[in-house]
Amino acid sequence: MQTQINNPATVLVTGATGTLGREVVKQLLQHSHHVRAFTRQSSPTVPQGVNIYQGDIRARSGLAEATKGVDTIIHCASFFESGYETDIQGTRHLIEAAKANGSPHLVYISIVGIDRSPFTYFQAKLEAERLVEQSNLPWTILRATQFHDYVLSLITSWTDENTSTITIPDGVRFQSVDVREVADSLVNLAEQPAAGHVPDLGGPEILMLEAMVDTYQLIYHKQNAVRTETLPGEYFDAFRSDVKLAPDRAVGQITWESFLQERAIVETAS
């Protein structure tokens, strides 16, 4: 499974305004590639030098123009939604457009453990993987653990400022990874020949959610009471399952604590 590597290359990033996509775009520019950002936003904020392609991957709009003449596609678009159209139909539409315009290297970011979980979102990601595998395009798939940013967003969403409490699901562990390290891996993979499934990318440590909340409160000078509950539903069942961990692939180096310390400094400065 080989593909021609052009340097600099023309690289399309789907989900280019998301948490991961923004960082991928930034790092591609640092590597002097020609970057195209595909996004649903009509007026997105992107770095200078990035070509914006507006469209909706679910509806196929804008993909024909965006994929024309690209060497590589880094597919970051994903959305937790009913029917998971972004992940399944969107991936199918992207592949169809890419094949109509040539044979670009398709690099897909996926999630650790999706082949061992009944969680419907994970199953949608697994179906997207199958579409990539069967696309007849040169392809690479990287599975990563959850992002530090994601865990932080969960903690803040579970915080009730009125009662000064944080209610979290019990029995949950995360092996969160810094999004910059995931982006770095994707960019490096995009610069190499297609490699199929590559080894998982996990964060540097496995932590109980309670410990992660404690670190968050210490760094952000919070004093909320932390309550644990057995929250029902497949979303929280997926949280409690350890299939999302990759203990033998703890290759990330930026810890949860380091991430929070840096984030707190940036927020204070701004």
Image: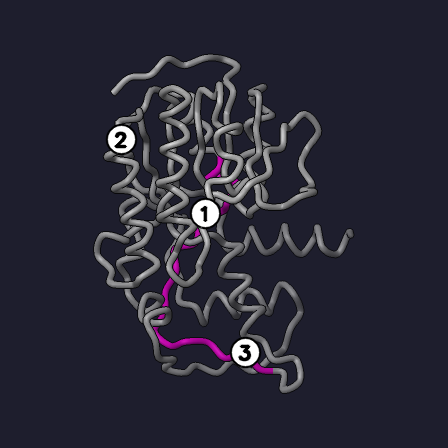
Badge 3 crowding class, 10 Å Cα cut-off, few under 14, some 14 to 19, many 20 or more, is some
**Drawn side of residue 58 relative to residue 46, left or right:** left
Q: Nearer the viewer, mark 2 or mark 3?
A: 2
Q: Amino acid at mark 1?
A: Arg
- Determine the image quadrant of residue 206: bottom left
Sooner in the amino-acid sequence: mark 2 or mark 1: 1
Where disc 2 sits, the SS reads strand
* CB-based contact (under 8 Å), mark 2 and mark 1: no
Residue of label 2: 196
Disc number at residue 58? 1
The magenta stretch is 165-183
Q: Does 133 appear above or below 222? A: above
* CB-based contact (under 8 Å), mark 3 and mark 1: no
Give yes or no for residue 168 being in the magenta stretch.
yes
**Drawn side of residue 20 relative to residue 198, left or right:** right
Badge 1 crowding class, 10 Å Cα cut-off, few under 14, some 14 to 19, many 20 or more, is some
Disc number at residue 166? 3
Residue at horizontal 57%, vertical 26%? 35
In three-dimensional space, the C-alpha distance between marks 3 and 1, rounded to whole angstroms, equals 35 Å
Looking at the picture, tell me which residue is in the foreground, 76 or 67.
67
Q: Quadrant of the N terminus?
A: top left
Residue 39 percent location from the top left of the image: 57, 41
Residue at horizontal 64%, vertical 73%? 222
